[in-house]
């Protein structure tokens, strides 16, 4: 039950953080391209790499931290369902170039960000 509460706490904070980030991006850059979801997915990918490296290196694999931060916070902060919906919207608007850029950029930059986050923490821990 303790771990489920940690997931709920982290998820609530992560969801609010995503809402605030997406709203700020929409106010700043407009809504023609889903910059907010794009940004949180890339930032979340960096964070998951960094957090997993930190947990493994400094916190001896703490299940509580992993569940709170990775499953909870990052699970609420990043969202594949919003990505899928926004891809559908771009396709329906026949914004094929933007859809391709969004899909390709999201996958490639998120994977790169996860690697960089992991590498950054491992370098500091070394």
Image (cartoon, rainbow, N blue to C red):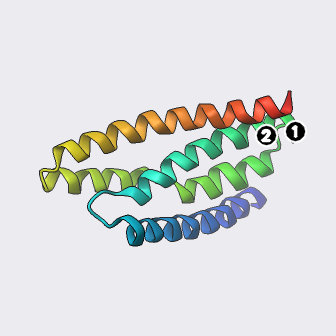
Nearest the viewer among 1 and 110 is 110
Q: Residue at coordinates 32% horizontally, 50% vertically from top-left?
A: 84
Question: Vertical placement of 21 versus 37: above or below?
Answer: below
Quadrant showing the C terminus = top right
- Give the quarter of the image for residue 115: top right
Within 10 Å of disc 1 (Cα), the crowding (few <14, some 14-19, many 20+) is few
Q: Residue at coordinates 67% horizontally, 59% vertically from top-left?
A: 7
- Give the quarter of the image for residue 52: top right
Asked whether the beta carbons under mark 1 and mark 2 sit within 8 Å of each other, the answer is yes
Nearest the viewer among 80 and 94 is 94
SS under mark 1? helix
Question: In the displayed structure, does residue 63 sit left or right of residue 45?
Answer: right
Q: Which mark is residue 58?
A: 1
SS under mark 2? helix
- Find residue 103 and report its horizontal and vertical position in percent: 33, 41
Q: CA distance from mark 1 to mark 2?
A: 5 Å
Question: Vertical placement of 9 versus 59: above or below?
Answer: below
Nearest the viewer among 29 and 109 is 29
Question: Vertical placement of 22 versus 42: above or below?
Answer: below
- Find residue 57 and report its horizontal and vertical position in percent: 84, 34
Nearest the viewer among 19 and 109 is 109
Quadrant showing the N terminus = bottom right
- Find residue 3 and report its horizontal and vertical position in percent: 74, 56
Query: Which residue in the protein does label 2 denote?
Result: 54
């Amino acid at each position: 039950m303790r771990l489920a509460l940690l997931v709920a706490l982290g998820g609530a904070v992560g969801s609010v953080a995503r809402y605030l980030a997406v709203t700020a991006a929409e106010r700043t850059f407009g809504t023609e391209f889903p910059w907010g979801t794009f940004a949180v997915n890339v930032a979340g990918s960096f964070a998951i790499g960094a957090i997993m490296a930190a947990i493994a290196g400094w916190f001896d694999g703490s299940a509580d931290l992993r569940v709170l931060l990775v499953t909870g916070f990052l699970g609420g902060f990043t969202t594949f369902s919003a990505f899928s919906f926004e891809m559908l919207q771009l396709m329906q608007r026949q914004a094929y170039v933007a859809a391709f850029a969004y899909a390709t950029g999201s996958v490639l930059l998120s994977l790169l960000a996860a690697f960089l986050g992991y590498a950054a923490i491992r370098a500091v821990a070394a």
